[in-house]
Image: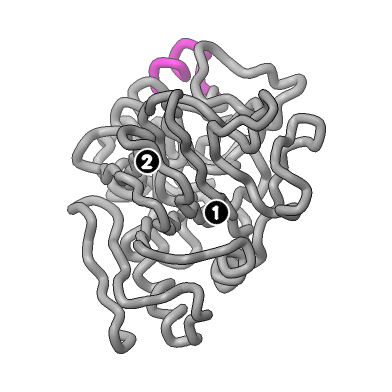
Amino acid sequence: MVHGMEIIPLSDAIGAEIRGIDLSQRPDEATIAAIKDAWHEHIVLLFRGQTLGVEEHTAFAGRFGEVGKHMRPKKIRNEAAELGPNVMLVSNIRENGKPIGSLPDGEMMFHSDTPYRERPDKATTLYAMEIPSTGGNTIFANCYLAAETLPDDVKRTLAGRKAVHVFEYGAVTKDGKFDRTTAPHFAQPVFRKHPVTGRTALYVSELMTEEIEGLPEDESRDMLNFLFEHQRQEKFRYEHVWRPDDLVMWDNRCSIHARTDFPDTERRKLRRLTVMDENPVLAGDPPGLTGVAAE
């Protein structure tokens, strides 16, 4: 353990608070290694009371890999150019009637970040700048536990299969399906193996997963509805109540997250940076089953 660093679990299922570290001071390699170990164990890390400008935030995210680009097309991108190509603002604030950021209002369905790309971002970091008095919480769910607790017959049905992830930029909820002629989409393994921990996660989400390949449409729909209900169970979750100057970092390879509703009359502003994955997406075997292997 690094001197002065404390790791406090946030729930039985997922998340830990890291205390005793000032991220603006460019932590040394031993500290970053300890943070990585905690991240791989707890999936979601919380650092409270951090003072981070864009430069300090980017420097910290860059210790975990190449910082991801904000991929939203320029014609529908709201962030100011001076923030650079990597920053996304998650905010409902409007200036001259135009949002200053993305995903502005209301609740947001469970999802992981960028699964509709061939190589999704492995990490997301989110820094709180302005927070409403109530709501706008982020709920995280542990997808290792979701995979491990599936019924064996479901595990067998899903073994070796892929699911199609689709996203229309700016969507926070949906009713039906996105338009794949314009929306980015990609098929990923339903069971995803983590390249560091070796554990297998259930890699689907209500907002972005639309189809399990190789199943009839009605069977695919029913299976996905079952999986969505399963993975959002309370026993897999931690709900984060934001404070200004919180920095939260999570692993997209083994978790999903959602946002609770908040008053549209109150300001909410967070700065988001992602970290690209140096590894390809790995298919995993259904956990706890013998004689069934990923293709």
Say left or right for 134 vs 285: left
Q: To which quarter of the image does residue 222 belong? A: top left
Place of residue 99 in the rendered image (x, y in percent of width and height, measured from the top left): 64, 30
Place of residue 101 in the rendered image (x, y in percent of width and height, measured from the top left): 63, 37
Q: Magenta-highlighted stretch: main secondary structure?
A: helix
Of labels 1 and 2, earlier in sequence is: 2
**Label 2's element?**
strand
Q: CA distance from mark 1 to mark 2?
A: 27 Å
Residue 234 shows in the view: yes
Place of residue 254 in the rendered image (x, y in percent of width and height, measured from the top left): 42, 50
Q: Is residue 65 above or below residue 11?
A: below
Q: Is residue 32 above or below residue 153?
A: below
Place of residue 14 in the rendered image (x, y in percent of width and height, measured from the top left): 28, 53
Q: Nearer the viewer, residue 87 or 154?
A: 87
Query: What residue is disc 1 on?
Result: 282
Please tell me whether residue 222 belongs to the stretch shown in magenta: yes
Q: Nearer the viewer, residue 120 or 289?
A: 120
Query: What residue is disc 2 on?
Result: 138
